[in-house]
Amino acid sequence: MKIARSALVAASLLLGGALLEASLWAGLRNLGVVAALPNALQSLFREAYRFGSRPIIQMDRSCTIHHGTLTYTLRPGTCAFSGAEFETRYHINSAGLRDDEESLEAPEIIVLGDSTAMGWGVEQRDAFPSVLERKTGLKTLNAGVSSYGSVREMTLLGMLDTRRLRHLLIQYSANDFEENRMIRGPGDRLPIMDKETFERSQERFARGLGYFPGKHLLSLAKACLRRLRDVLYGAPDVSGEAEAFVRVLSLLGSPRLERAQVTLFAVDRDSPFADAVRQALARGRQPRWLREAKVMDLSDIPRRENFYALDGHLAPRGHERVAEKLLAASGLDIAQGSSSIGRR
C-alpha cells in the first residue's frame, strides 16, 4: 500500500513537472501570451528565460573581443544581437563602444554604464545616450558596455578623450556590486580573465543555450537557489552597495572631472539606494566633482510598458523615458542645445 502511494506521489510530481516544463516551453515561444499574464506568473517565464535561454552579448564572439585591461569590449565593426523579444544591429567604433567614430573625439557628454546604457534590446538610435544627443545637440559618447561594473567603467573613462567633457552620466546597476566590492583601497586591482579563459567561457555558454528536456525547470531551480542564498547569507545591504559605489568613483576618478557636472543614477534600484548614495557622498572626503554630483532616482518608471517582459531590460519607450528624466534634472538645456553648467 505504501509503495503504491509513493508511486502515485512520484507520478504526480513527474506529471506536474512535465506540465510546467511544457507550459514554460510553449510560453517562451508565444510571447504575446506571456505579456498578457499578471506579473506574478510572468516572473516564472522571466526566471526560466534569464537563467537558461537568454543570449548574452559578451558571450557572443561575433560581438565581443578580449581586452587585457577590461576583460572584453565590443568587437569593432558590426554584429547582430537578438533575444526572444528583439533583433538589433550593433555598429561599434574602434574603442569597442556602441557609437560612431566621431563621438570618440572630445565628446561633451559621456555616458558610462552597463547593458542598460549600451542599449541592450534596442537599436542604436533608440538607446537613451543617442536620444540625449539628438535632443541637446551636444556630442555624446555612449560608453556603456554590457556587464561592466563601476570599476571597469571608470577604468574605461581614463582611456577616453575628456578634453571637452561637460556632463558625465554614470548609470549604476545592482550587479555592479560584485565588481565594486573588490576595490577597497588605492592598491587594489580587479582580476581580469586572460584571453584563453574568456574564450572558453564563451564556448561553454554557447553550448548551454541549446534545449534539452527539463531545461526550464532546471533554470527555475537555479533562480530559487540564488534567492535562497540571499536569504541565508544576506543580500548586500543598500548602504554597503552605495559605499562601494562611491568608493570606486572616488578612487578611480580623475581631477579632469572637476570641469564636468556628474550625474549618478540607477534604473533597476529603488529610492532607498539613491538616498544611500547621497548619504555616502556626504560622508568622508570626496573629491569636489563627486561631492557635487547629482543623484537621481528613476525607480518610478512603470515596468509593464517600458521594460521587456522576459528580458527585463528597457524597451525603446523606456529609453525615451530615461532620457526625458535625465534632461529634466541633469542641467542640460534642450532649447539652446547647450549645457547650462558648462566648464568649471
Image: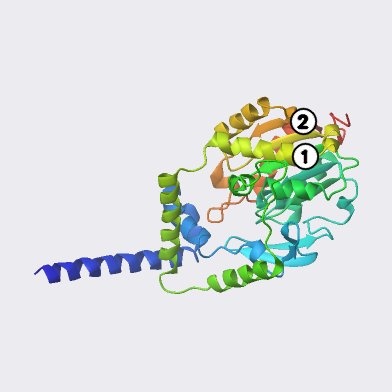
Give the SS element for disc 1. loop
Q: Residues within 10 Å of mark 1 (few under 14, many from 20)?
A: some
Q: Quadrant of the N terminus?
A: bottom left
Q: Amino acid at mark 2?
A: Pro
Q: Do residues under tags 1 and 2 come within 8 Å of each other at their CB atoms?
A: yes
Residue situated in front as seen by the camera: 222 or 302: 222
Residue situated in front as seen by the camera: 207 or 300: 207
Instruction: Identify the residue at the far front of this view.
Output: 187
Residue 29 in the image: above or below residue 265: below
Q: Which mark is residue 193?
A: none
Where is residue 322? Give x, y as percent. 68, 41
- For the question of whether residue 56 can be seen, the reply is yes
- Residue that carries the numbered disc 1 in the rendered image: 253
Where is residue 179? Give x, y as percent. 63, 49
Q: Quadrant of the C terminus?
A: top right
Residue 220 in the image: above or below residue 168: below
Q: Residue at x 72, y 30 (%)?
A: 294
Q: Amino acid at mark 1?
A: Gly
Instruction: Identify the residue at the far left of this view.
Output: 1
Q: Residue at x 79, y 47 (%)?
A: 157
Where is residue 236? Give x, y as percent. 52, 41
- Residue that carries the numbered disc 2 in the rendered image: 287
Residue 293 picture quarter: top right
- For the question of whether residue 166 can be seen, the reply is no
